[in-house]
Image (cartoon, rainbow, N blue to C red):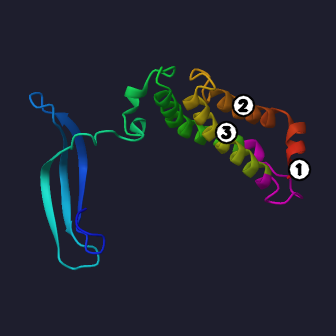
Amino acid sequence: ESGDDENSSWDILSAKSATIQENPETHERFVILKSGYRYQGTPGQKNYNVVKFSEYDLRIPEGKTSVRHEEKILPTDVLFPLNNKNLLYAAELQWRLALPISVLLLGFLAIPLSEIKPRQGKYASFLPAAVIYVIYANLLFVSRTWIVKGQISPLLGMWWLHASIFSLGLLLLFFPDIKRFFKRRG
């Protein structure tokens, strides 16, 4: 972006892939963009340029190399082990693992909660299921924050929460009295 606010010109790059490389002689860092487009123009104006490129090198200016939330863009294999000394990496890894695990656990929990009797309403289990989901989702966010702040060990991480939801699913599946307790409340 350049110029004054009213007539500022925008320069936008988009690419299918990007890598960062450092020149070993000058120690300058570059972003190498591949298969993309460069859009140049002023917002609201019809005169703009679109340039298609197969490779585009962009030097990273000195002093602007810090990346906020670097852990979010790293490949998963870099974030291992689970008990990483870098708490941001440990929390990010646990978060990435928590999402598919939560799909499986919530699907498992849906089995006992979806059972209804003939005279019972279709939505009798909806409220308990929604409450369990909201509590579980919020505790996932809280657990991630606790890991980052070092309040719980990355080894314990979010596993206690997954184990709790799995245990609740087993209780609801094998003990009908507990299912009746949840359905009366809902």
Residue labelled with disc 1: 185
Pointer 3 local density, CA inside 10 Å: few below 14, some 14–19, many at least 20: some
Check if residue 31 falls in the magenta segment: no
For the residue marked with disc 2, what is the amino acid?
Ser
CB atoms of marks 2 and 1 within 8 Å: no
Say left or right for 138 vs 41: right
* Magenta residue span: 111-127
Q: Position of residue 74 (x, y in %)?
A: 37, 35
Give the residue type that dot 1 points to: Arg
Q: Quadrant of residue 126?
A: bottom right
Q: What secondary structure prevails in the magenta region?
A: loop
Residue 108 in percent (x, y) is at: 67, 39
Horizontal arrangement in the rendering, residue 97 relative to residue 42 (left or right): right
Disc 2 to disc 1, how far (Cα)?
20 Å
Looking at the image, tell me whether mark 1 or mark 3 is earlier in sequence order: 3
Q: Which residue is mark 3?
A: 139
Extreme residue toward the left, this view? 25
Label 2 belongs to which residue?
Answer: 164
Q: Is residue 126 magenta?
A: yes
Judge whether 177 appears above or below 153 on screen: below
Number of other residues with Cα within 10 Å of mark 1, as a class: few under 14, some 14 to 19, many 20 or more: few
Q: Quadrant of residue 181?
A: top right
Q: CA distance from mark 3 to mark 2?
A: 11 Å
Q: Position of residue 52 (x, y in %)?
A: 14, 60
Please rate how many residues cluster around mark 2, counting C-alpha atoms within 10 Å: few if below 14, some from 14 to 19, many from 20: few
Camera-side residue: 12 or 186?
Answer: 12
In front: mark 1 or mark 3?
A: 3
* Residue 169 location, quadrant: top right
Q: Nearer the viewer, residue 5 or 168?
A: 5
31, above or below 13, in the image: above
